[in-house]
Amino acid sequence: MSAAGQVRLVARREITTRVRDKGFIISSLVIVLLVVGVMIFQLVAGGRTSTTTIGVVGGNPSVETALQQAGEASGTAVTVTELPDEAAARQAVSDGDVDGAVLDPVGDSPQLLVESSGSVDDIVRSAVGALSVGAQLAAQGVDLQPAPNVSVTELDPSDEDDGPAVVVALVGVVVLYGLLILFGQFVAQGVVEEKSSRVVELLLSTMKPWQLLAGKILGLGVLGLAQMVLIAVVGVTGALALGVVSVPGQLIGTVLVVIGWFLVGYAFYASVFAAAASLVSRQEDLGSVLTPTTLLLVVGFFISIQAGQDPGSGLATVTSFVPGLTPLVMPVRMAAGDVPLWQVLLAVAIMAVAIALVVRVGGRVYAGALLRTGGKTKLREALTAERA
């Protein structure tokens, strides 16, 4: 069988094995449910309108209109309740039937009754002030006319709000971060399983170490890409169906950018995880060799969150060119729309060089340590064994 055929054979084996794995199935369902849950939460939270009920003693129809307009200006839906007298107003406030009660709103000494100060104060002051101004102008014979509508002219209609795109990128980075760790662990666990069970000795009798490594990374990479695309489709479709957000081409482009950076990040981290895992022979020892790489992912994740708040900061700019951090930071900066094309191309070029170096060095470590069992192999020993 040709080298390409050997790689495809290993890749097919990894895919069929993981697809039947309960851990993989459960993790996939959990991620999809989390994405749907986030959208439902946003729908519920975004659909909530602040409401308040205000009682009125001695008012008229214009008072109700003024209170509702004042509430609308502050983003609050106001319900007005007529009350017969001050005693009834005090009782309604004490019982919580109304959030506040206005006494004599069109008189010379209006009074507001509330349990504690809050947004009702501003609404009532604004409404009473408007009523007072209107009454004084009417007393002077001024004929009040409705305020004219203000026409809005966009000087740059193509300049879209980047906020939704940044939010999509941040959600995508969270998913990307989780999948990089998940599939990196899959690669590492597979290496240790084959090494501890001596299956690797049988495999290496028919193929070269680099073919085994390439097939393992390729197979799990295909699964990771399929999972990322599934999550993207569920997220975009769900957002449109639930009306959580309108998704223009800009946001769909952001989703595609995140998927692209997942492929770049996976190629980098899968090689590192596989090489590190080949240094040990037991699952219990995996944590000690994977911790540095996992910490790098954690650092990149937190920097990407900071980049979402300030995409143009020096920290976000510099780390978007650091191999290993680039796949997590650059998508957020790109979503903000202020990254020059040359910076994106430079980041891709740096990652390509880094991936080539990691694959080369990691392949040597993998080949040198794969057949060493019985304990933890030192990095120098693995490199020396491969050269020998």
Image: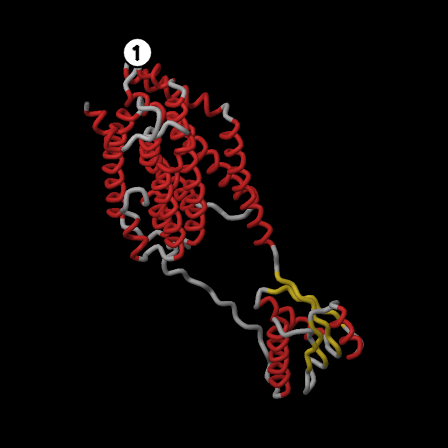
**Residue 359 placement, left or right of 164:** left
Quarter of the picture containing the C terminus is: top left
Q: How many marks?
A: 1
Q: Secondary structure at mark 1?
A: loop
Q: Report x, y in % for residue 209.
A: 29, 21
**200 in relation to 77, above or below:** above
Q: Which residue shows up at 60% across the image and 74% down it?
A: 122
Residue 268, given in percent of the width and then of the height, sits at 31, 36
Location of mark 1 (residue): 1
What is the three-letter code of the residue carrying label 1? Met
Q: Position of residue 347 (x, y in %)?
A: 26, 44
Image spot of residue 17 (x, y percent): 46, 22
Going 69% across and 81% down the picture, which residue do you hit? Answer: 111
**273 relative to 147, above or below:** above
Name which quarter of the figure residue 49 lies in: bottom right
Judge the density around disc 1: few (<14), some (14-19), many (≥20) Cα neighbours within 10 Å: few
